Image (cartoon, rainbow, N blue to C red):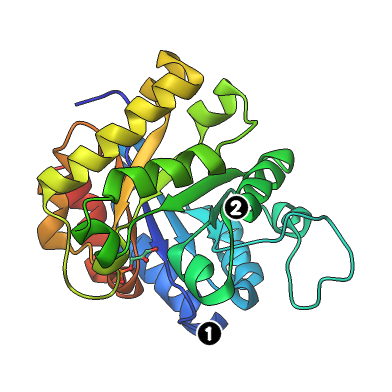
Amino acid sequence: MSDRKPIISGNWKMNLNHFEAIQTVQKLHYSLPKEVYDSVDVSVHPPFTDIRSVQTVIEADDLDILLGAQHCHWEETGAFTGEVSPAFLAKLDVQLVVCGHSERRDLFGETDEMVNQKVHAIFKHAMTPIMCCGESLDEREAGETEAKVLSQVAAGLDRLKADQVASMVIAYEPIWAIGTGKTATADDAQTVCNAIRNAVAAQFGADAAAAVRIQYGGSVKAGTTEELMAQPDVDGALVGGASLDPDEFARIVQFAIA
Ligand code: 13P
């Protein structure tokens, strides 16, 4: 076991309206004993239209659940129709922002360079990036997993300071495992997460590599969490579908520290 605090994040994607979001976060809170948060960070990443409502519940009820977002632009203001400023997220007390998710890259054309700009913007507003990386099935079958993932990591972390990298989260999400019910084996997840940590060490030094938290994501369920979390370089999970069910998500959180 490392001394990195595990972090379990629920990426709700484009699911749950703001009423449903409030209920989900309240149920999650009731399903988790208060002491859990001493051992694991838990974040939820609702759609933008839910964030204000979820923030109000978290603050009014003094919940220990961390508020996250799924995406942001890198500019503070301007003519970017439909985009959301990192400054606006920070104003809503958002703490963690996912960036570079494969769905953003594949469906909305986000490049490594855009992801890097977002990472810098998220830090500028004193929030923590959860920067995603991961290979497609074709890339995996061609034996290109590490080359792909490490090139995304190097580009995404470009021009950061070592202490910033130390404080952030990297999520390894093999694209073929997202929403498919297929998970990487715990060994495969460990191999790639270890390669990411070694690349961070080479680029930013041993201290940053020892501190950066690396999540696995892709069809994580309660039943697969314990084995994944037993891997020395897997520090948490980025959970999609299973995070929409507060009971299942609470079980994942508890298995993460079992
Ligand atoms: P699933 O857990 O639904 O596979 O989604 C994973 C994911 O993309 C989280 O960001």
Q: Residue at x 68, y 48 (%)?
A: 117
Question: Could you tell me residue 55's position as x and y percent?
Answer: 61, 62
Q: Name the residue under label 2.
A: 115
Image quadrant assignment for residue 150: top left
Q: Does the residue labelled 2 lie within 8 Å of ligand 1?
A: no
- Regarding ligand 1, which quadrant of the image does it lie in? bottom left
The furthest residue to the top: 206
Q: Nearer the viewer, mark 2 or mark 1?
A: 2
User: Which image quadrant: the C terminus?
Assistant: top left
Disc 2 and disc 1 in contact, CB within 8 angstroms: no
Circle 1 — which element?
Answer: loop
* Kind of residue sitting beneath label 2: Val
Direction from residue 176 to residue 77 in the image, left or right: right
Label 1 packing within 10 angstroms: few (<14), some (14-19), many (20+): few
Direction from residue 151 to residue 17 in the image, left or right: right
User: Which image quadrant: the N terminus?
Assistant: top left
Circle 2 — which element?
Answer: helix
Q: Which residue is drawn at 55% across and 43% down?
A: 156
Label 2 packing within 10 angstroms: few (<14), some (14-19), many (20+): many
The answer to whether residue 35 shows anywhere in this view is yes
Question: Could you tell me residue 4's position as x and y percent?
Answer: 34, 28
Nearest to the observer: residue 165 or residue 27: 165
Image quadrant assignment for residue 187: top left
Whether 3 is drawn above or below 140: the answer is above
- Disc on res. 17: 1
- Disc on res. 187: none
Whether 71 is drawn above or below 64: the answer is below
Q: Residue at x 44, y 52 (%)?
A: 132
**Lower sequence index among marks 2 and 1:** 1
Nearest to the observer: residue 81 or residue 150: 150
Question: Could you tell me residue 223's position as x and y percent?
Answer: 10, 61
